[in-house]
């Protein structure tokens, strides 16, 4: 159980010491690179299973980050690395190619392809949460006095376990962010394609044509998602942390 002084906030910590800043930035970047690679590989794998081999031919059905980096070098390396060093955590983007004609013919398969990416991030959230819960039960991890994004656990067992708790905290937090953000139902996020599972075929067709014929919707959708994200993510983060530390007190 966490101590009574434990509180939760979503303030991202940034160490005042340059060496710690660099270590934190590299940790975030590595986790981002792996998590994004898994996300895009899941999209590509789901598309392949659904009959679209576009991403497969591009090499994206792989956990090797190189084909994903070749497709989006700025979004997967330059931007996240620079932003992590500058602000303490990464911003970036990636994509997996698909055939729009395939998506028109098989909208349900395209929707499942869209869900596969966030689903991969959710899997990492669950695995990290289980590892943190087991570590807490074993006395290796404990709840820090202040829980926030990127710091869900700490350890006084050893320097190694403290590093492991930090890594798991980042995996948990960053993948929860990727999962929630990508499921927002605004184009071009994955949630905008996944909602077609709730539509009939004719409505889906008109919806797809509207999205694909209006390029500015992508910028508008990202702006709306950015503005609304905190209102959605805050309670989700709090609820997820409460699954690791039942009964935690909030400040």
Image (cartoon, rainbow, N blue to C red):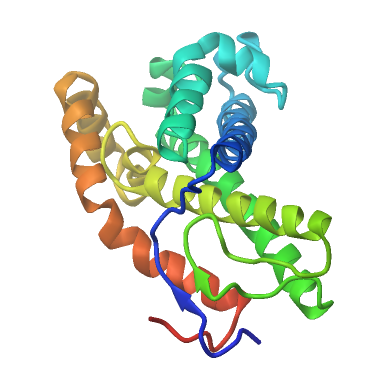
Residue 86's x, y, as percent? 42, 31
Residue 6's x, y, as percent? 52, 81
Q: Quadrant of residue 205?
A: top left
Q: Residue at x 46, y 53 (%)?
A: 13
Between 90 and 51, the residue placed more toward the observer is 90
Q: Is residue 226 visible?
A: yes
Rendered-image quadrant of the C terminus: bottom left
Between 7 and 128, the residue placed more toward the observer is 7
Residue 32's x, y, as percent? 56, 36
Count the marks.
Answer: 0
Q: Is residue 97 visible?
A: no
Query: Relative to residue 187, is residue 57 drawn left or right?
Result: right
Placement of 3 over or under 85, stated as above or below? below
Query: Relative to residue 165, is residue 98 drawn left or right?
Result: left
Placement of 103 over or under 21, stated as above or below? above
Residue furthest to the front in view is 17
Q: Residue at x 39, y 16 (%)?
A: 101
Query: Relative to residue 231, is residue 251 drawn left or right?
Result: right
Residue 176's x, y, as percent? 50, 54
Q: Residue at x 58, y 76 (%)?
A: 243
Rendered-image quadrant of the N terminus: bottom right
Q: Residue at x 60, y 87 (%)?
A: 3
């Amino acid at each position: 159980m966490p101590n009574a002084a434990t509180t939760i906030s979503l303030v991202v910590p940034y160490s005042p010491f340059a060496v710690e800043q660099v270590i934190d930035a590299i940790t975030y970047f590595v986790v981002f690179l792996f998590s994004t690679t898994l996300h895009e590989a899941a999209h590509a794998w789901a598309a392949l299973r659904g009959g679209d081999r576009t991403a497969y031919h591009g090499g994206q059905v792989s956990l090797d980050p190189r084909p994903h980096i070749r497709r989006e070098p700025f979004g997967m390396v330059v931007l996240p690395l620079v932003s992590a060093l500058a602000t303490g955590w990464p911003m970036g983007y990636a994509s997996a190619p698909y055939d729009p004609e395939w998506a028109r013919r098989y909208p349900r398969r395209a929707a499942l392809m869209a869900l596969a990416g966030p689903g991969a991030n959710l899997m990492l959230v669950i695995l990290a949460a289980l590892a943190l819960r087991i570590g807490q039960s074993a006395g290796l991890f404990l709840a820090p006095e202040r829980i926030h994004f990127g710091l869900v656990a700490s350890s006084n067992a050893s320097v190694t376990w403290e590093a492991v708790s930090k890594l798991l905290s980042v995996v948990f937090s960053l993948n929860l962010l990727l999962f929630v953000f990508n499921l927002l139902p605004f184009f071009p996020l994955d949630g905008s394609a996944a909602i077609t599972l709730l539509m009939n075929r004719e409505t889906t067709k008109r919806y797809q044509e509207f999205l694909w014929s209006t390029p500015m919707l992508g910028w508008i959708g990202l702006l709306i998602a950015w503005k609304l994200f905190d209102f959605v993510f805050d309670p989700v983060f709090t609820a997820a942390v409460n699954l690791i530390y039942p009964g935690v007190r909030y400040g």
